[in-house]
Image (cartoon, grey):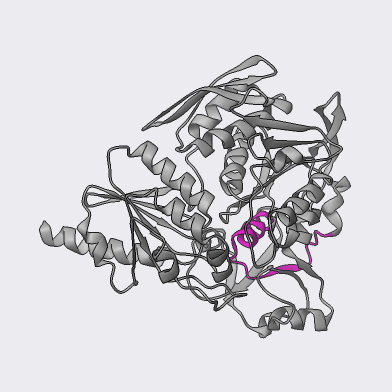
Amino acid sequence: MLEWKESHSHGLLSQVAFTAQSRKEDHLMDNATVYHFVGIKGSGMSALALILHDKGFKVQGSDITQYTFTQRGLEKAGIDVMGFDEANIHEGLTVIAGNSFTDDHPEIKKARAMGLPVYRYHEFLGHLIEGYTSIGVAGAHGKTSTTGLLSHVLSGVAPTSYLIGDGTGKGTPNARFFVYEADEYRRHFLATKPDYAIMTNIDFDHPDYYTGIDDVYSAFETWANQVKKGIFAWGDDPELRKLKTDVPVYYYGTSDRDDFQAKNIKRSTTGSTFDVYHDGKNLGNFEIHLYGEHNVLNSLAVIAVSYFEKVNMDEIKRELADFKGVKRRFTERKLADMTIIDDYAHHPSEIKATLDAARQKYPDKEIIAVFQPHTFSRTIALMDDFAKSLNLADKVFLTNIFSSARETQGAVSSKDLAAKIAKGGEILTVDNMSPLLDFHDAVVVFMGAGDVQKYERSYEELLSHLSLKNN
């Protein structure tokens, strides 16, 4: 059976056949073991579990019993998911530990005491991508959407394995490409050394770890110097423009100084169209059924990577036009006379992009934002920016701050953020979502990285009962 390995020739990749036995990852892959994922419902962890399952390995995992949006894929694959219990750990396991859990977690602690092989998620991923043409997608914002888009496009033209941060993973036999989301949190992406990298932006986030923008930049530059072939970076980001690295950096954007440029952008209620130029050459007109300027830029990055892979531009056009989006990124449903949008946005820049997308698709409707702040440290560090972004909505509601496993309390509350919001700021509880019933023929955007979906479900239940009553 043949697979594909890359070789570098004049800045472009050529295909060289080689046998599966030569893969560098093989020392990790053991058919005799069961891969046990501690925290299998995590978005990256569930995706990685699905990849190993697809590759024919035995997979199981443990996590909290509360339902999560990543769970459905694991259930469909028939992967056994147990509650946390040190009794889950026994001989014959290889343990992959989620990064949300310290070495004091009972399962991880027992596995180490027994001398079982234990890998952290990012360490295992770093080994897994070897032997493919690997493309890592990093950025403070936009990495999940861009990873999903790139995975979709490349899968349409060549065998592709991928790991997306919305819990989606696929281990494709004889894959030529491996596309993965590279997480900058705690510098985890430094465990990976891809052939190519897409960098969507560098912004200050994760204030519980990073000291400021310079610290974030340092992490990205270190990773940039681990990239083997080339980097595709957003040209309007001042931090990305400072990158010093030995491999070529190709900038994409809407400026004449960008290597890949989008021109003649037309945004409508059905999506966007734009022309793409590279070094003065018109690569064609492209159409996406996605919303917001950020999705034009994400598409541009995907086109740039594909161009360097000598993929036919007509195939790229077809695949881009066919992409429907990833989980929890501008996911829509209609109920009664309302449009309800669910989005993972939890940083001011992401909120701004999500509301921009809502305005593009629904220019004549009132836009109501329901935002769940995620972590106390982020809320304190970015308070003014949160208020500025949320005020782009016509009306703003908040929930209480969602605490994380690492950060259960802090010296700030949603009331502090509400005081800075000009367009409302009323705080909703899951038991009383009735203030949202005052809006009709409007768009409600639920945003957050915690459990904001429980508020969404509560509102939908109210709305359903009201509709039934009126009918």
Depth check: 96 or 299 in front? 299
- Looking at the image, residue 273 sits to the left or right of residue 185; the answer is left
Depth check: 87 or 269 in front? 269
- Looking at the image, residue 270 sits to the left or right of residue 314; the answer is left
Q: Position of residue 31 (x, y in %)?
A: 78, 62
- Looking at the image, residue 410 sits to the left or right of residue 103; the answer is left
Q: Is residue 31 magenta?
A: yes
Quadrant location of residue 5?
A: top right
Quadrant location of residue 247?
A: top right
The magenta stretch is: 28-53
Q: Position of residue 295 (x, y in %)?
A: 52, 37
Q: Quadrant of the N terminus?
A: top right
384 lies above or below 176: below
Depth check: 324 or 425 in front? 425
Q: Position of residue 409 (x, y in %)?
A: 54, 78
Q: Position of residue 28 (x, y in %)?
A: 82, 60
Q: Quadrant of the C terminus?
A: bottom left
355 lies above or below 280: below
Q: Give the residue at x 39% y 59%.
A: 421
312 lies above or below 436: above
Q: Give the residue at x 42% y 46%.
A: 355
